[in-house]
Image (cartoon, grey):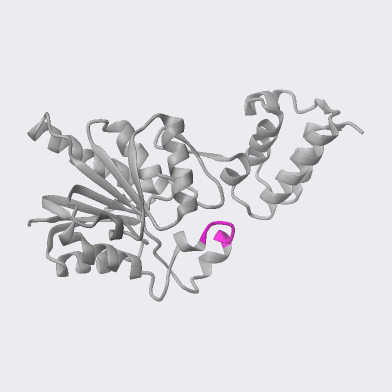
Amino acid sequence: MSVRIADLLGEAQAAGVGRADAQRLAAHQLGCSREWVIAHDDQLLSDARDVDVLRKLLQRRAAGEPLAYLVGRREFHGLTLLVDRDVLVPRPETELLVEWALELLEEGRRAQPTASPDVVDLGTGSGAIALAVKHAAPWARLSASDASAAALEVARRNAAHLGLAVDFVAGDWWQPLAGRRFALALANPPYIASGDPHLAALAHEPQRALVAHGDGLDALRRIVAGAPQHLRAGAWLLLEHGHDQADAVQAMLTAAGLSEARTRADLAGLPRCTGARWSG
């Protein structure tokens, strides 16, 4: 039995799926653009498989599964990244961390035009941060760590897909980087406290990438504690964190011996990234 695209999209909207998401899922399943779906939503779908798969995708979206997992990709800082349920969906807020890193790398390049600074992304997940930095600053040497073998596989697939060279290493935060020092270190670690009510809306994403047990600062503490052994003199450590954690992160950076601690706000005006410099 044939079904109009508009009728399927109407079912989805009645179940709570946004119009744009429903159109994107239809475009994904039908192998066309969202614009085509908008212009041809009166088209009859006679392929029973298309109807069945699209209806199931729309039902999964209605149940709260992120659109990125359903279509298998996500845009981040101008790159199209492959994503699945082994990695956190890259957020627009994290682009702030990338932009700050690129500013610092540009400053360094002006001072030393021929230098190839070593940069590390701790807890890389899909590889979003490391790959965005490498794409915009190809003269930098990028390394990235993650304790999840499944996440590293996604990151490596993204690097191959984008043709970007990043050295991915398996291990928890600094652990696989013993004896190495970097000119810049970046991290978007889990920073949501156990029991936070917002976790209910994030149930489809890997909890290890979201939750830092206790007060939400455990991963940040571990990264800051290891920084002095892994940063070169003058290097910066930049961290993404929760909107209410900036003061605590600045305090731990200062206590660890880093200086010039400062925080930047995201597009919503919320304190989102904090960094400090290791004087050596």
Q: Residue at x 28, y 51 (%)?
A: 186
Residue 205 in percent (x, y) is at 54, 56
Task: Report the quarter where the N terminus lies.
Answer: top right
Q: Quadrant of the C terminus?
A: bottom left
For residue 227, side relative to residue 234 (left or right): right
Q: Is residue 149 above or below residue 10?
A: below
Residue at x 35%, y 56% (from the top left corner) = 270
- Asked whether the viewer can see residue 95, the reply is no
The residue at 26%/69% (across/down) is 248
Q: What span is in magenta? A: 201-206
Where residue 220 sits, quadrant-wise, is bottom left
Q: Nearer the viewer, residue 272 or 219?
A: 219
Relative to 117, is 151 above or below? below
Corner quadrant of residue 279: bottom left
Q: Please identify the dominant SS of the magenta region.
A: loop
Task: Check if residue 164 falls in the magenta segment.
Answer: no
Residue closer to the observer: 256 or 175: 175
The spot of residue 114 in percent (x, y) is 12, 29
Given the current orientation, which residue lies at the most extreme right position?
1
Find residue 59 and report its horizontal and vertical position in percent. Answer: 73, 49
- Residue situated in front as seen by the camera: 248 or 189: 189
- Of the pair 112 and 32, the residue shown nearer to us: 112
**What is the x, y in percent for residue 243?**
36, 61
Say left or right for 49 vs 257.
Answer: right
**For residue 110, what is the image quadrant?**
top left
Report whether 48 appears left or right of 183: right
> Could you tell me if residue 81 is visible in this image?
yes
Q: Residue furthest bottom?
A: 214
- Report the side of 162 relative to 35 (left or right): left
